[in-house]
Amino acid sequence: MAFKTLKIVFLGTPQFAVPTLEALHASRHALALVVTQPDRPKGRGRVLAAPAVKVAAQRLGLPVTQPHKIGESAFVETIERLAPDALVVAAYGKIIPQSLLDLPALGAVNVHPSLLPKYRGPAPIQWPLIHGDPETGVTIIQLNAQMDAGDILLQEKTAIASADSTESLHDRLAEMGAVLLVKTLDGLAENTITPRPQDHEQATLAPMLKKSDGRIDWQMEARALERRIRALNPWPGTFTFYGQERLKILHAKVIPRPAEAAPGTVVAGFDDELRVATGDGLLSVEMVQGASGKRLSIGDYLRGHAMPPGTRLT
């Protein structure tokens, strides 16, 4: 039986979407158009920067467009003229209007980095880490009008390692999603995939994170704080205050001993170590970023900032 090639319009914006775009380009399917968000000012200089997907599309020689509003009739008509078999969405960053979802015969498929119906929403990579889940994964769903609630087409799991951070999971899930997405399109082309409705009673949310979520609450147990540090790296980052200085904690480990001090209190340890009492156990801070903006091992930081036992972090 001849393999059917699908005509695809791809919608994605950040680095997470790039592996999927590259996998589509390398597949037997035809990429008719890449849609990404407009260039945005970035950095302290507020210099206009192209999204990662635009950079990748131009490198691959693919046609790319950056509409300000994808629901406008002129843009919808552009997609209608292309007559795609399916839309592929990977972290586009805006809700896809029903007028677009209704155009392709196969609808729109979405790459979502969690094991749906768990962790619907904008931060599905971070929350499994925060909660200490043993596994996460990628789900390819059929998009509908409800957020991340469409039928499941394919799903793949991966274990969460004790050293995993949002950064490491992001990269692994992006690569997994790219492979699974092409496998999904192949299955749709050959009519070998049966959509499976989500169990909405099992749905949980992954709400958007705020900068304030990064402030460390020393009343929490050490294991929960260590997971939070891994989950909120690189953004928004976890931080505490040493006097008036905002101290970003980049890496830490749990010491399973009784705290024997009020939460947030520095306790005795080795000379190049910073042990802090928590609500349950001790947290050994290993890497920080202070007012200088430099990432420092705790030994290097302590050589310029004395923190004797009894010092309070808030």
Image (cartoon, helix red, strand yellow):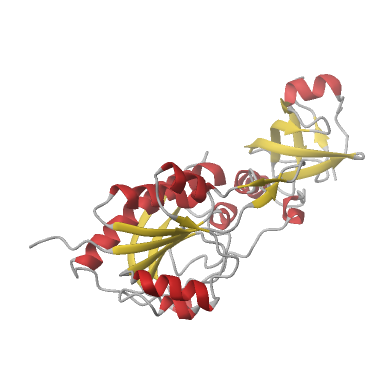
Whether residue 309 can be seen here? yes
Residue 237's quadrant in the figure? top right
- Residue at 52 percent of width and 78 percent of height: 73
Q: Which of 141 and 272 lies nearest the eye of the viewer?
A: 141
Outermost residue on the right side: it is 244
Examine the rendered structure and indicate whether residue 54 appears above or below residue 268. Answer: below
Image-based side of 6 in relation to 147, left or right: left
Q: Position of residue 190 (x, y in %)?
A: 18, 66
Q: How many marks?
A: 0
**Quadrant where the C terminus lies?**
top right
Examine the rendered structure and indicate whether residue 198 appears above or below residue 174. Answer: below
Q: Which of 300 and 94 lies nearest the eye of the viewer?
A: 94
- Residue at 47 percent of width and 80 percent of height: 98
Q: Which of 132 and 262 lies nearest the eye of the viewer?
A: 132
Q: Position of residue 173 (x, y in %)?
A: 44, 50
Q: Position of residue 55 (x, y in %)?
A: 51, 45
- Residue at 86 percent of width and 25 percent of height: 305
Q: Position of residue 307 (x, y in %)?
A: 86, 28
Image-based side of 182 in relation to 312, left or right: left
Examine the rendered structure and indicate whether residue 148 appears above or below residue 34. Answer: below
Whether residue 236 can be seen here? no
**Quadrant where the N terminus lies?**
bottom left
Outermost residue on the left side: it is 1
- Residue at 75 percent of width and 30 percent of height: 274
